[in-house]
Image: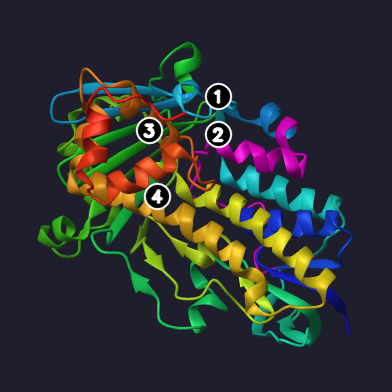
Amino acid sequence: MLKLDVAVIGGGPAGSTTAALCAARGLEVAVFERDTFPRFHIGESMLPQSRKVWDDLGVTDALEARFLRKYGAQFVDASNGDEQAYRFAEAFDSSVTYAFQVERADLDHLLLGNAVAKGAKLFSGWSVQKARPSLAGHGAVDVRDPDGTKTTVAARIIVDATGRDGLLSATHGKRETIAGLDNTAFFSHWDGIRRREGQLEGDIDIVCFPHGWFWNIPFKNGVNSVGAVCRHDWIRELPKGLSPEKIFERAVELAPWVGELVANGTRRTEIGALADFSYRVPDIAGDGWCSVGDATGFIDPLFSTGAHLGFVSGRSASIAIGEALAAGDTSKARFAEHEATVRRGAGLFVGAVQSFYEGTLQRMIFTRPQKTAMRRMITSMLAGDVVERSRWTDLFERFLTGQTAERSAIYGDAESPQ
């Protein structure tokens, strides 16, 4: 029987980050991934604050060589063509001024290969049938290899990195849907989409229309990812039986800016669809296990939260795992700081997304002229600076709860937090 310190179920960014950092600590780690990489995935726009994890992983130079730099975000009001640009250099933490626009098939493959290079074992095409964590450090994972042969692997700690499947996290209490975020995304890749020039070329476009928003993400190879995130109440009003392609076309009709964007483009993939984006799980960890990435919950992709929280949670999980194994204590309590880190980052992102759909944050984004505190607050959130507690995150958190003094400070002339 294979005996491991850590069994990671799932080889996406969160799983590969956890595996690489645990292996770098000298732990016996294996990743069980049912798919064969490279494989398609959405979530293609990275955030600058992820750079701190990429540096720990040792992959920053490889990302630099492969992908297009993203220095900011452009917001567009489809109703009138109004545009507002945000540059990451304006964030409260301006130590990292750019991220990357990535094709996830390439990124995920690179990250998984990095975990192997750090010493993790990879079982590609192996599906996990059941995970049985244990407080005593005698957990087990029942797996099936590509030929269908079943076996059991021993693991002191099991990491659920299975994304929306939530192999462990979904079985420890009922998932909670997040109010107002029951949306569906329709997406594809395009050739021939017009681009901005210079540093603006790599910016993501977020185009607001009455029933949701569009993304436009440029890649280094000339391809663009274009998608529409649409509210379910609007989709339910459409004629029944419409294909994803027809629903996407209906959305484009309501956003002339996007119509002009794709007018001379050629779609190179079918329109895909992904529904019911956002949920929370009651438990992120337990005795002998923890979860990372989308297995901890998922948020509407408006502010490119998914991969960033995957990187952050993978790093925090690896720290908790190392400390738990060193102490000989794999109880749930050992993962309290990991859970707090994930909850805090996700909570601020959820609040921002809900405020955007409610209208308050969207109005802030397009406000002219903008006060310095408001602009830097929005930019810091777009950069992914939501995990570490600081004066700005405290201010943002209070703003999202509707505290009048904080809203006045942001809209008014109060001194910006440092």
Q: CA distance from mark 1 to mark 2?
A: 7 Å
Q: Which of 70 and 263 lies nearest the eye of the viewer?
A: 70
Mark 1 and mark 2 residues within 8 Å of each other at the beta carbon: yes
Residue drawn 63% across and 78% down? 332
What amino acid does circle 4 point to?
Phe
Residue 369 visible in the snapshot: yes
Please report the bounds of the magenta region as a residue range.
33-61
Kindly report the distance in space between the C-alpha atoms of the residues bearing marks 2 and 4.
Answer: 15 Å
Give the mark, 3 or 1, whose residue is nearer the N terminus.
Answer: 1
Three-letter residue code for mark 3: Met
Q: CA distance from mark 3 to mark 1?
A: 15 Å
Q: Secondary structure at mark 4?
A: helix
Residue at the outermost top position:
198
Query: Which residue is the site of mark 3?
Result: 377
Q: Looking at the picture, which amino acid does disc 1 mark?
A: Thr
Instruction: List x then y, in percent, for residue 410.
Output: 27, 31
Q: Quadrant of the N terminus?
A: bottom right
